[in-house]
């Protein structure tokens, strides 16, 4: 963590914004072989048609419910060997144990090929700083072009947000595409574009933007003359309770962060996370919260739109004062809230059996 101020931030605050000069957009060329629409939306046909079935796993509850659901279908069709689980490792930004858990879930589900990919260079926090430097340089250039004082420009927020979600493309999508390149090369002997079925655990119930996503669609940006990528969201229509029921059925372990009360996994401090989640995360990871707060000062903008990490830390400290340190809830708390205590008790027994079976077999 860098502690020194890199830029003269006070000079930037409240200063005029340089007018933006719009560059003409170059239309992205998509290879003529890439279809506009998927040839089918029937799950078993999608599985049968694919050369590779790539299951994206964050290690979170939706990923793991999707994983066991897809594996079950692929197994029934005798096509489990096409399944590859990929986890984008976010390093210290994600909850501890997430990468190991994602690998364990894939093993327990019976998947043989598990790939962990990681973005090159800085982690998410480091990227915020790099982005700030670029935004500042751009704003200064534009101010000079417009005859304004470059020292008085206001820099656009460097943090990711719902409208500038570069974090996902930088630390998740980009590294997963490098796997697509490798998988495509492995089947180059086919002499035609390799068909990749990219399975994502996004659900309509999570948010209005996710509700608008199609269950099946061609990913034209990820496709080219060598590979055609179809996105499949197998649990798009599932409710939270259905997700938890699938986890209970599978007996696979889920991340303890849910029992602590987190609603999402992945980055401990997600720019899109709800206030309760980020405050809880600040109580559970105070050192990481302090790093985010220091970065806010460096880049002169709040971590979340309208909610700074400094304020999140203040609210976390208030709760610590009122309630004392957060106590670890009993294992199964998150699941019990959706499927009841007795079904959760059965799940916990099944989970231990599933884990023991793997330990004995390996
Ligand atoms: S979890 Fe949140 S902050 Fe992290 S990459 Fe995804 S959207 Fe961005």
Image (cartoon, rainbow, N blue to C red):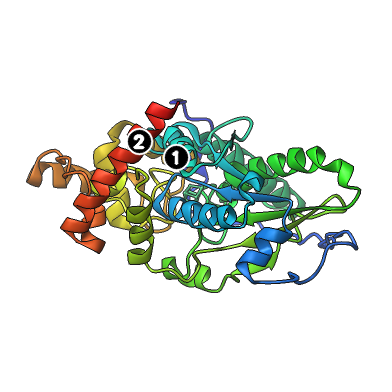
Q: Is residue 28 above or below residue 188?
A: below
In terms of depth relative to the viewer, which is nearer, 10 or 29? 29
In terms of depth relative to the viewer, which is nearer, 296 or 315? 315
The residue drawn where x is 79% and y is 38% is 186
Give the alpha-carbon distance from disc 1 to disc 2, as whole Å.
Answer: 7 Å
Check the picture and name the quadrant holding the N terminus: top left
Query: Which residue in the protein does label 2 denote?
Result: 355
In terms of depth relative to the viewer, which is nearer, 286 or 348? 348
**Callout count:** 2
- Residue 196 horizontal/vertical position (percent): 72, 53
The residue drawn where x is 74% and y is 41% is 183
In terms of depth relative to the viewer, which is nearer, 340 or 77? 77
Q: Is residue 272 above or below residue 216?
A: above
Check the picture and name the quadrant holding the C terminus: top left
- The tag on residue 108 is 1
The residue drawn where x is 48% and y is 36% is 103
- Residue 150 horizontal/vertical position (percent): 65, 45
């Amino acid at each position: 963590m860098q502690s020194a101020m890199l830029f003269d931030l006070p000079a930037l605050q409240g200063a005029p914004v340089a007018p933006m000069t719009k560059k003409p957009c170059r239309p992205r060329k998509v290879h003529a072989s890439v279809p506009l629409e998927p040839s089918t939306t029937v799950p078993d046909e999608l599985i049968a048609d694919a050369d590779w079935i790539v299951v994206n796993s964050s290690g979170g509850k939706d990923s793991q419910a999707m994983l066991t659901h897809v594996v079950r279908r692929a197994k029934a069709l005798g096509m489990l060997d096409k399944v590859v689980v990929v986890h984008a490792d976010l390093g210290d930004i994600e909850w501890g144990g997430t990468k190991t858990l994602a690998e364990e879930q894939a093993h327990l589900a019976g998947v043989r090929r598990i790939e962990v990919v990681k973005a090159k260079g800085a982690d998410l926090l480091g990227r915020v700083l790099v982005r700030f430097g670029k935004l500042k340089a751009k704003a200064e250039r534009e101010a000079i072009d417009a005859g304004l004082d470059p020292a008085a420009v206001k820099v656009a927020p460097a943090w990711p947000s719902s409208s500038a979600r570069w974090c996902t493309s930088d630390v998740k999508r980009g590294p997963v595409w490098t796997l697509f390149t490798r998988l495509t090369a492995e089947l180059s002997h086919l002499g035609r574009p390799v068909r990749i079925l990219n399975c994502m655990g996004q659900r309509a119930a999570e948010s209005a933007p996710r509700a608008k996503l199609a269950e099946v669609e061609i990913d034209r940006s990820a496709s080219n003359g060598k590979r055609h990528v179809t996105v499949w969201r197998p649990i798009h229509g599932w409710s939270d309770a259905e997700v938890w029921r699938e986890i209970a059925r599978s007996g696979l372990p889920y991340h303890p962060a849910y029992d602590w009360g987190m609603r999402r996994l992945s980055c401990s401090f997600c720019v899109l996370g709800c206030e309760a989640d980020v405050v809880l995360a600040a109580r559970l990871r105070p050192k990481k919260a302090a790093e985010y707060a220091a970065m806010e000062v460096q880049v002169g903008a709040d971590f979340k739109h309208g909610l700074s990490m400094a304020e999140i830390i203040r609210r976390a400290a208030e709760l610590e004062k009122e309630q004392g340190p957060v106590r670890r809830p009993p294992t199964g708390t998150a699941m019990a809230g959706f499927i009841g205590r007795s079904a959760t008790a059965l799940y916990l027994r099944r989970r231990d059996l599933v884990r023991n079976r793997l330990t004995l077999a390996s």
